[in-house]
Image (tube, coloured by chain):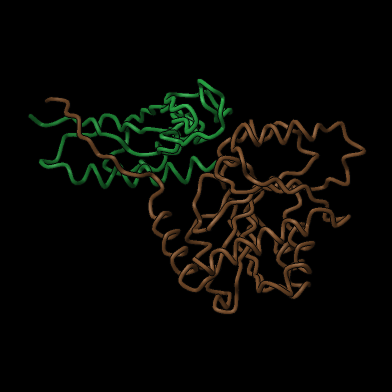
Amino acid sequence: MHEFTIGRNLANAVCEAYAEVDPPPRRLNTAHVVVGALHQIVPEYLVDAYRRYAEDTPVAGSTLELHPLPVHVTCGACGWSGDIELPFIRCGACDSAGVTLDSGRELYLDRLEVLTHE
Amino acid sequence: MNEQTLRVYKDLMGDNHTWADVTRRLLSARGVHMLNLIGSPGAGKTRLLEAAAPRLFPRLRFAVLEGDVETTRDAERMARLGVPTSQLLSGGSCHLEAKLVHYGLRDLEIDALDLVFVENVGNLVCPAEFDIGEHAKVAVLSVTEGEDKPHKYPLLFREAEAVVLTKTDLLPHLDYDLEAVLRAVEDVHAGIPVFQTSARAGDGIQAFTDWLAGRVAWRETT
């Protein structure tokens, strides 16, 4: 249930980012979040946590959209670079375990879609 | 009215990263190494520390931060061995966060220590998500939990810098494929050490404590 901790942080981050929008928009429609595949996050739990923490804030009622990012590696043995399927963290070409993670650990608020007054 | 898209790019760990960085810098400046032990409830994390304590005492000054949802029982077990211990109660949360760990460290005489173990709340998922300011995560996995856990919880085993396999004295009584779990660890994080231990029989504990001593010595020289 770490989704509730992340949902709290997310609601705070969305509120802060929304408050900095100039001129102030009419409302927040959607917050977009990027989630690397290594994070074991249950989307429904995070959406629910966000909704609850966003209550009684200027971003209440906004929608949360999650965008999964696959695990991407580069092989130190053969140089192959590409997405892999968990749980095997190995080269997709030569099966070497000597790979570096290029992505998959991301967890960030990517963008806001706001409705302006104009 | 128009819809407008605004780029943000904001990390979602909130102030946890800040607390973790402050803690790590504080410990590093004083030459103290901190390990984050993560495993299921009942994996044998406390028992591992109890078994390791006599082998660590002569070489390393260490303390334990015991993370639990409720009760102070694990902290009492460590305190009975004379180990400086502070209890961290997560209050229902499934993981420890960096701020609570930082406050827990204030209960310890850091300058009199070489090593701090943080025994995280029993859980293979949530604690792996949070940097608590440790220098390394260690996954603790008992042989009664099945061989496929590294495949099921890849984040923990990818983040961990070592795995301690516990309760190996039970192997003769179990249909457990030891090679399979070792392969599963390799699939997720090749090359990390796997210590096969039995706290009851004393097997493998020396190798684990030697590894710990090596890490502390390495940090002191860098």
Q: Nearer the viewer, residue B34 or B41?
A: B34
To which quarter of the image does residue B136 belong?
bottom right
Q: Position of residue B189 (x, y in %)?
A: 59, 38
Considering every residue shown, the one lying at the far top of the view is A93
Q: Residue at x 16, y 42 (%)?
A: A21
Please say if B66 is above or below A16. Answer: below
Which colour denotes chain B?
brown
Q: Position of residue B47 (x, y in %)?
A: 78, 57
Q: Is residue B28 left or right of residue B160?
A: left
Q: Quadrant of the N terminus of chain B?
A: top left
Q: Is residue B53 left or right of residue A115?
A: right
Which colour denotes chain A?
green
Q: Residue at x 50, y 49 (%)?
A: B130
Q: Is residue B214 left or right of residue A66?
A: right
Q: Position of residue B126 (x, y in %)?
A: 56, 44
Q: Residue at x 48, y 67 (%)?
A: B28
Q: Residue at x 72, y 54 (%)?
A: B45
Q: Is residue A76 left or right of residue B128?
A: left
Q: Position of residue B68 (x, y in %)?
A: 65, 56
Q: Nearer the viewer, residue A117 or B103?
A: B103
To which quarter of the image does residue B105 belong?
bottom right
To which quarter of the image does residue B82 belong?
bottom right
Please say if A57 is above or below B181. Answer: below
Considering every residue shown, the one lying at the far left of the view is A118
